[in-house]
Structure formats: C-alpha cells, structure tokens
Image: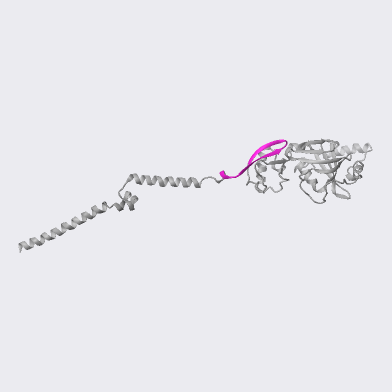
Amino acid sequence: MLKRKMAEEGSVIDSDDKLDSDRKGMKTDVSQDPCREQCCPKNADVDNGNPEMNETTKEDLSAEEKNKDSTEDEPTTSCRETASFRVVWNKKSYEVIFPIDETADCLKQHIENLTGLPVSMQKLMYKGLVKDGSKTLRELNVTNGVKMMVVGSTMNDVMKVTPPPPGALKEEKTTLGNLGWKDTSSKEPLCKQKMHKKVLDKGKPDDVMPGIKKKKEKLPTIPIAGMYNKYGGKVRLTFKLEVDQLWIGTKERTEKIPMGSIKNVISEPIHGHEEYHIMAIQLGPTEASRYWVYWVPAQYVDAIKDTILGKWQPF
C-alpha cells in the first residue's frame, strides 16, 4: 500500500510539472511570435516602453498641428489682384498700383493722398466720366497700362477765381450808369445782343453736329466740330484728357490750352434753336478774354463744363 500511495503522489507531481512547463513554453512562444511586431509595431513599442519612439511621435504630431495653424492664419489679402496704370492730373502723371476689386471711391481717396486734391473736388475720367463711385475697377474694365484723368481744382485755385464782392459790382454798375452806359448784358439774352446776332444771322452751319435739347450726354470720342467762332469762322473743340488740355482748332491754327488755366465757362440756349447753345470759354482773368463758340450741341454743354472746371464751378 505504501508503494501504491507513493506511485500515485509521483504521478500527480509529474502532472503539475508538465503543466508548469507548458505554461512557460507558451510565454516563450508569444514573445517570439514574428507576427506581433508586423501587425502592431507602434503598440509593441509603446507596450515595451520605448521612450525614443514616444518622443518622436509627439514631436511629429506637434509639428503637424503648427503647420495647420499657420496655414489657417495666412492672410488672404496677399493674393489680391492689382492693376498698374497712370493717373494724370494738373499736367502731372502718377504711377498707381491698386487692387481691381476696390471701388472708384477708394481710388479717389488714394489719389487725394498722392496729389492733395480733395475727394469732393475730383472728377475721375475713364472712358468718360465715372459717375458711380461704388463700382469696382474690375467692373470699370481697368487693366494694366491704361490712363485715367482726374479733373478738379484745389481750394486755392477756386479762391483765385472767386467773384468780386457784391459791393464792388454795385459800385461798377453805378459808375457805368453815371457815364450814360446801359448794362444790356443782364437784360438781353445773348442771342439778341448785336455781336452775337451778327454771327447767328448766318444760320446754322451745314456740317454742325446734331443737337438734342433737354438731354445730357458724355463727351464724344471725336472732336466737337462744325461750329462758328465770333468771326464766323469754323471752329472745333478737342478734349485731350491724357494731357489735361483743350485744343481750340480753326482753319488757320490750333490753340492748345491747359484746362487748369481756364477760369470760367458760360452758355445760353439759342432762342428758336434750343438744341444748340452759345458758349463762352474764359481763357484769362477778365471777361474780355472770353472765346465765343456758336451752335454748340446742347447735349454736350454740361459735359464740357464738368470736364474743364470739375465739380466745383465758380458760378
């Protein structure tokens, strides 16, 4: 019996030893499994507590986040499309580079910074008068290399042509009355006065441009021709906006006059032919320097005044 009992205990011990041996073998096999590192290399490194890989991973993620943030913070204005063009005012030319998606009003503010000419006294000319300041340069078809004209006078220029005070005019009229002279100019319309009637009696020129009353149009791209001067000779007006000049042409010669030197422009409809005007362009400081033009098409009268004198007219 003793032998039998020892034999049974020996078999139990052998069985326990075998189980422990199997467990150890499994651990060895798992640690040596070649698929573990292929399937989960990152997890394996983290599980094994590899400090170098953990630090590298953190640095990569940090750099990725910084690049993303810097991309989002980049200003979009660096990609704005611009146009390079010339602005001409008062015989001076300015090179301007300006975003084409900005408005004409913004461009006027930039021109004020360049020239000192206040925005309120600027007339911007590009393919005619730019009337809508809310339009962008893109909408106005402004491209590289084009020219723009700015018409307008500074406040100092306006003050130079300010009419004399009422007292001085009253004194002048009194003096003329004492001398026996009558001031017919304020009573009679221009077309009834002798000097103008003499020219008008020749009749409307055959080659004058058609006139349209009660209508306003921008300046034509060609000279306004077929009119008479005070001598009854043919005259034409050409507006050279790129050099800020008015060219008064006759058969004999062409006078090139800076628009900034013109002091005044007046006009009056011709009775019976209201589609045409008599116009006087004052080239000097006194009324004696007025250049008279007859049969000016009525639709261009306001455009002529605006182009020569700008928005601020001294009358």
Q: Nearer the viewer, residue 120 or 233?
A: 233
Query: What is the magenta segment's predominant secondary structure?
Result: strand
Can the viewer see residue 303 in this picture?
yes
Image point (86%, 42%), residue name: 228
Query: Which is nearer the eye, 246 or 54?
Result: 246
Residue 21 in the image, given as x and y percentages of width and height: 18, 55
**Relative to the observer, which residue lies in front, 210 or 111?**
210
Which region shows up in magenta? 78-97
| Side of 304 relative to 16 (left or right) | right
Position of the C terminus by quadrant: top right
| Residue 41 drawn at (x, y percent) | 33, 50
The answer to whether residue 215 is left or right of residue 180 is left
Q: Left or right: 81 with respect to 176?
A: left
The N terminus appears in which quarter of the rendering? bottom left
What's the coloring here? one colour
Please say if 25 is above or below 230: below
Residue 164 is at least partly visible in this image: no
Residue 67 is a magenta residue = no
Image quadrant where residue 188 sits:
top right
- Residue 191: % across, % down: 89, 45
Q: Quadrant of residue 79?
A: top right
Q: Quadrant of residue 240?
A: top right
Task: Please check the rendered image and state whether residue 87 is part of the magenta-colored stretch, yes or no.
Answer: yes
Query: How many numbered marks have been drawn onto this rendered protein structure?
Result: 0
- Residue at (7%, 63%) from the top-left corner? 4
Q: Residue furthest bottom?
A: 1
Image coords of residue 173 (percent x, y): 89, 39
Residue farthest to the right, as pictured: 180
